[in-house]
């Protein structure tokens, strides 16, 4: 439950930062946030659909889902986390909110810790998870040499 509570606090603080903190003037640089938002949605949405109603905020594997290794999961092990982080950074940049960027960085640290715990549990639950880990990046694609 600690994972859920910390995640909720970080998301609430991030939302507050986007709405209630002052924006800076970054000019055209703000538009760098738009492609991050698009890629974030392209990663998070299919992952969300893959989990459907079985989605949980806990780092405990859901045996009913099985080990996901296809679709966006063939590119990164945690596409939902990656997508959420890209959305968080993209919105903060687009809205020119320095506190939003700071809280997106805090979310990055949090999701890295949560993913490590989740992966520890996935290795126990699924024997082939270790092979999947070796070939697929956690948040970014792992480039293979041909």
Image (cartoon, rainbow, N blue to C red):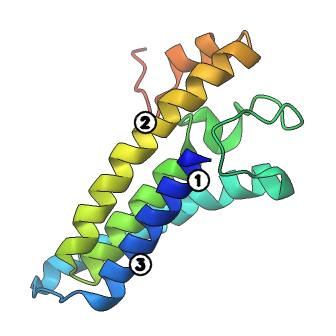
Coordinates of residue 51 in the picture (x, y in percent): 78, 50
Q: Give SS at disc 1.
A: helix
Coordinates of residue 60 in the picture (x, y in percent): 70, 35
Q: Is residue 34 visible?
A: no
Coordinates of residue 35 in the picture (x, y in percent): 37, 68
Gap in Å between the C-alphas at discs 3 and 2? 21 Å
Left or right of residue 87, residue 69 in this image: right
Vertical arrangement, residue 101 with respect to residue 142, above or below:
below
Disc with the residue nearer the chain's start (3 vs 2): 3
Label number found at residue 113: 2
Vertical arrangement, residue 35 with respect to residue 142, above or below:
below
Tag in front: 2 or 1 = 1
* Residue with the mark numbered 1: 4
Gap in Å between the C-alphas at discs 1 and 3? 16 Å
Residue drawn at x 45%, y 64% as measured from the top left: 9
Q: For residue 75, which quarter of the picture? A: top right
Residue drawn at x 42%, y 27% as measured from the top left: 142
Coordinates of residue 63 in the picture (x, y in percent): 85, 31
* Residue with the mark numbered 3: 15
Residue drawn at x 18%, y 88% as measured from the top left: 23
């Amino acid at each position: 439950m600690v994972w859920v509570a910390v995640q909720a606090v970080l998301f609430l603080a991030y939302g507050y930062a986007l709405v209630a903190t002052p924006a800076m003037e970054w000019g055209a640089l703000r538009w760098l946030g738009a492609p991050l938002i698009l890629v974030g949605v392209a990663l998070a949405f299919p992952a969300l659909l893959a989990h459907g109603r079985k989605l949980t905020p806990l780092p405990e594997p859901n045996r009913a889902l099985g080990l996901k290794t296809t679709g966006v999961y063939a590119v990164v092990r945690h596409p939902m986390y990656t997508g959420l982080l890209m959305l968080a950074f993209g919105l903060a940049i687009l809205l020119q909110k320095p506190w939003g960027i700071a809280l997106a960085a805090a979310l990055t640290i949090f999701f890295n810790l949560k993913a490590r715990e989740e992966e520890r549990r996935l290795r126990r639950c699924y024997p082939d998870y270790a092979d999947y880990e070796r070939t697929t990046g956690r948040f970014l694609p792992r480039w293979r040499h041909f």
